[in-house]
Image (tube, rainbow, N blue to C red):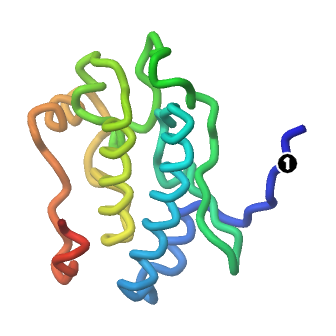
Amino acid sequence: MLVMNMLDIDLRKYLQQNHNNLTWKERIQIITDIILALRRIHEENAIHRDLHSGNILYNFGNAFRISDLGFCGPVDKPLKSIYGNLSYIAPEVIIGKEQNFKSDIYSISMLMWEISSGQPPFNNYEHDYDLAMNIVNGMRPKIVPGTPLEYEN
């Protein structure tokens, strides 16, 4: 039997409503919650394959959790197609390589940027072939001024 918690809001909406009031300690706690949840997935030898702020849910007064496990599966059973939100897809996956644990970590880095900036990565770009090729060729969001060094690294 599957038991699910009632969750109130996704990370994107949470950041839209709260970003200006979040301390760096709170931002670091958010990404820590997400990383610990992803660690549990990876410990099962699975990868999520679709991490983005719409798939991170928050229960007020509790913690952030990873949702939408539709593409989640064993690392040794690759999917035949690319799925997900372009801004969070690792460059090597865009060019057709198999997703792996590192692909999820790339998505975490984009979530970290979103938590620091309050905006989804590449929000000012059309999500098209040109953006995909720019990502493949090394384009990344710029670090937000005022970001603590320990968060940058």
On the picture, is 105 further left or further right than 92? right
> Is the residue 116 above or below the residue 67 in the image?
below
Position of the C terminus by quadrant: bottom left
Q: Is residue 137 left or right of residue 126?
A: left
Residue 60 percent location from the top left of the image: 70, 76
Q: Secondary structure at mark 1?
A: loop
Taking the view exactly as shown, the residue that stands out farthest to the top is 80
**How far across and how far down the image is residue 94, in percent?**
28, 25
| Residue plotted at (45% across, 16% down) | 78
Q: What percent of the width, then of the height, locates residue 40?
A: 55, 48
**For mark 1, does the 10 Å Cα neighbourhood hold few (<14), some (14 to 19), or many (20 or more) residues?**
few
The residue where tag 1 is placed is: 3
Q: Residue furthest right?
A: 1
Q: In the picture, residue 147 is in which quadrant?
A: bottom left
Give the residue furthest to the front.
43
- In this rendering, would 59 be left or right of 71? right
Q: In the rendered image, which quarter is residue 2 located in?
A: top right
Could you tell me which quadrant the N terminus lies in?
Answer: top right
Q: Residue at x 44, y 85 (%)?
A: 22
Out of 112 and 122, give the one closest to the viewer: 112
Q: Amino acid at mark 1?
A: Val
Q: Position of residue 136 (x, y in %)?
A: 16, 31
Q: Is residue 57 above or below residue 135?
A: below
Looking at the image, residue 107 lies above or below residue 58: above
Residue at the location (81% across, 60% down)?
6
Seen at 85% across and 48% down, the residue is 3
Q: Count of labels shown?
A: 1
